[in-house]
Each structure stands twice: as structure tokens, then as C-alpha cells.
Amino acid sequence: MDKILQGFMQALENVVTKDEFLKAWEGIVTQFKKTEATLTEKVDARLAELKDGPPGKDGKDGKNGRDGKDGRDGRDGLDGRDGEQGPPGPPGKDGDIKDLSPEEIRNALELLLGDDRLKTSAISGLDEAIADIKQRATRVQTPAKAYMIHNKDVSSQCDGSNKTFSVGGTHFGIVGVYGTQHPIIYRPVIDYTITRTGILLTSAVSAPESGQSLVIQFLK
């Protein structure tokens, strides 16, 4: 303020004309207004601080609260509708019997029933072999006695479930067993065991179906 008055007094000393005095006075008034505005702003700010108090420091973070209990499971929703059926796929290719293994061919043949099963004529040379077995008669010489080989056609006993076959009486040994159903030539002990009146097929082979041929060679 003293500087302002000093400036004012200095201006008065140098005043020569009325206009110069007025300009100097306007400058002093303007400077007073600026000073008043600045002081008013500072006073208002200070009064606000005294009223509300100075800003406090941030407090420490609080501890986390305990976890709440798990909620109950919701109910199952309704089942959705079945989707529409898709278009049919392209037709498959016919299989080639050349691609099958011998075991697969055998298994497929054993599943055939009745008239669908293979005939003896379908196996090359089988009819002739069976006929030769039936017609052949050979004597077997033993130290005590000579026995004759007999052929017994037991095909009538084949029904798809029977595994016990009789030659019509007692015998002195089984020479061989032959059929038109796998295994064609039956293996002793493995495919059949010998009974007092014939043979009993084991679990290694299936029972011959109706229409199949089975011939037993035996000694008597």
C-alpha cells in the first residue's frame, strides 16, 4: 500500500496537466482493485480452511470381512427338446470277401442256419472223400485179434445242439471223425473225446447243425 501511495505522490509531483493527473489516478484505482481482489481471495480461502479444518491424512486400509456362506445349488433346468434327425448318410460300399481273414470267414459260416448253410457239394472233393470213407473197409492186425474199421454215418443225430454221438454199440477205438461243418477233420482229445459207444465233442467246436454230415470211423 505504501508503494502505491508513493507512486501516487510521485505522480502528483510530476503532474503538469489535468489529463495526466486523471490517468495517474485511474492507474492507482485499478491497482487498488487488483490488490483488493487478491486479498479478498486469500481471506476467503483462509476462512474456508478455518471453518472446515485442514484435510486429514488417509486412514489405514480396513481388514477384509469374513467370507459369506455358500449359496444353495440351483434347481436343474428342464430337459431340452430332441434335435431333429439328420439326413441319412451315403450308402456304404459292399465288402469284399478277399478282405476277410480265415477266422472271420469261418465264424461267418458257422452263423448260417438251415438251408443257408454250405452243402457238401460246395467243398471241392468232399463228397468223394466221404463216399470213399463209407465204402472203404480195412483190417487192423493186433497181436491178439484183427479188427475191422467201420464207418458210421451219424448225420441224423446232428440238430445244432447235440454233441454226443453214438456208433450204435460198443467199439474198440475211434479211428477218425469227419464232417461238413468246421473243422471238417476233428482232432482227437482237442475236438472230441472217446466214449464207450462213440464220441463227445468238446467246447472247442460247435454242435453240427441239421443238414450237416458227420461220419465216425471206429474199430470193431
Image: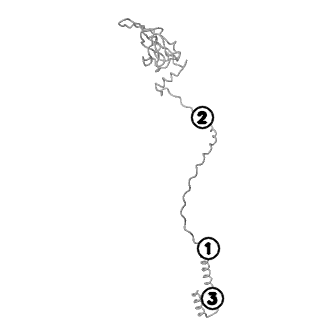
Vertical order, 13 against 124 (above or below)? below
* Eye-nearest disc, 1 or 2: 1
User: Splitting the image into 4 quarters, where does residue 190 fall?
Assistant: top left
Work out how far the residue at label 3 is from the one at label 2, CA to CA, in angstroms.
Answer: 107 Å
Tag 2 residue = 88
On the image, the x and y values in percent for residue 150 come to 44, 8
Work out how far the residue at label 1 is from the one at label 2, CA to CA, in angstroms.
Answer: 87 Å
Tell me the crowding category of disc 3: few under 14, some 14 to 19, or many 20 or more residues within 10 angstroms, Cα based: some
Tag 3 residue = 25
Going from the N terminus, do you reach mark 3 or mark 2 first?
Answer: 3
Circles 1 and 2: CB atoms closer than 8 Å: no
Q: Is residue 177 shown left or right of residue 61?
A: left
Q: At label 2, which amino acid type do we have?
A: Pro
Give the residue displayed 54% in from the left and 20% down from the top.
Answer: 113
Residue situated in front as seen by the camera: 77 or 159: 77
Tag 1 residue = 51
On the image, the x and y values in percent for residue 199 come to 46, 14
